[in-house]
Image (cartoon, grey):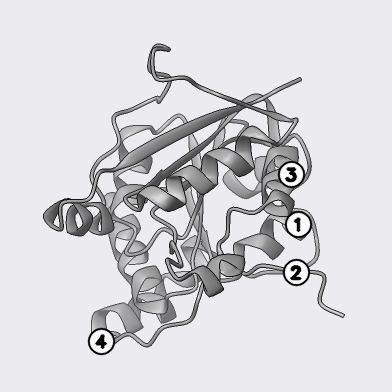
Amino acid sequence: MDRRSVRSFVMRAGRITDAQRRALAELWPRFGLSYGPQVLDLTALYGREAPCTLEIGFGNGEHLAARAQAEPGRNFLGVEVHRPGIGHLLMAAAAAGLDNLRAIDHDAVEVLRDQIAPDTLDEIQILFPDPWPKTRHHKRRLIQPEFAALAASRLRTGGWLRLATDWAPYAEHMRLVLDACPLLARQHADAPPVAPAARAATRFEQRGLRLGHEVADLAYQRRP
């Protein structure tokens, strides 16, 4: 029986360009990682010890590539299943020479469960996950109690889980779920900013703003 209760994604059709297809074929050996049930040795993977950020569902990768370029002292690992987006990220990584960036083409729940050791990551970032707005689809949302416990367990003490959504009901759902996780403490609005760099607007965020949506940014810190 599959132990996964919620997927981190939904498969949608998307056109892949010739350049993205070439990137997947030619650049994957340099930047890509295959899923497997073995825990990753992050020090060996990047050839150094450094703080590591995992981004779940990076879309086209613009935000992930920008952060990797702006923060060369940090390692970045992106998880995505949308192959055109992966190809786009690989092209950006190659163009900028981002040796601190790797990508995995797989379900992020299984990656966290099987490939990331507990107390390993310094940051997990989830920007604009599918809100599944219809009530009958709420069970498909990524942010659920089981996922919160899993993600928190993979963070180091003091590490951060950062989320953003432009769907107000999902923001409230996130707060209810994550506030109930005993390993996480929410950063309140009056606390000083803790992000290492200002977050650039993603494609999904720009679309939401054009529609008049209010963006909610949430940050939770791993308790001892």
Q: Earlier in the sequence, mark 1 or mark 4?
A: 4
Q: Earlier in the sequence, mark 4 or mark 2?
A: 2
Q: How many marks?
A: 4
Whether the residues at callouts 3 and 4 have beta carbons within 8 Å, the answer is no
Mark 1 and mark 2 lie on one chain; the one further toward the N terminus is 2
Q: Position of residue 73 (x, y in %)?
A: 45, 29
Specify whether residue 184 is in view.
yes
Is residue 130 or residue 194 the one in the foreground?
130
Q: Are marks 1 and 2 in contact (CB under 8 Å)?
A: yes
How far is the residue under mark 1 from the one under mark 4? Answer: 34 Å
Q: Are marks 4 and 2 in contact (CB under 8 Å)?
A: no
Which quarter of the rendering shows the C terminus?
A: top right
Using the numbered discs, state the Cα–Cα distance from disc 2 to disc 3 in whole angstroms. 13 Å
Task: Identify the disc placed on residue 149.
Answer: 3
Real-space CA distance between mark 3 and mark 4, rounded to the nearest whole angstrom = 40 Å
Residue 157 is left or right of residue 70, and the answer is right
User: Which residue is at a point 29% across and 43% down the rendered structure image?
Assistant: 215
Q: Mark number for residue 4?
A: 2
Give the image location of residue 100, x and y in percent.
46, 44
Give the mark nearer the N terminus: 3 vs 4.
4
Any mark on residue 113, and which?
1
Name which residue type carries label 3: Ala
Mark 1 or mark 3, which is nearer the start of the sequence?
A: 1
| Residue mark closest to the camera, 1 vs 4 | 1
Name the residue nearer the viewer: 106 or 17.
Answer: 106
Mark 4 = which residue?
18
Q: Secondary structure at mark 2?
A: loop
Task: Say which of marks 4 and 2 sits in front.
Answer: 2
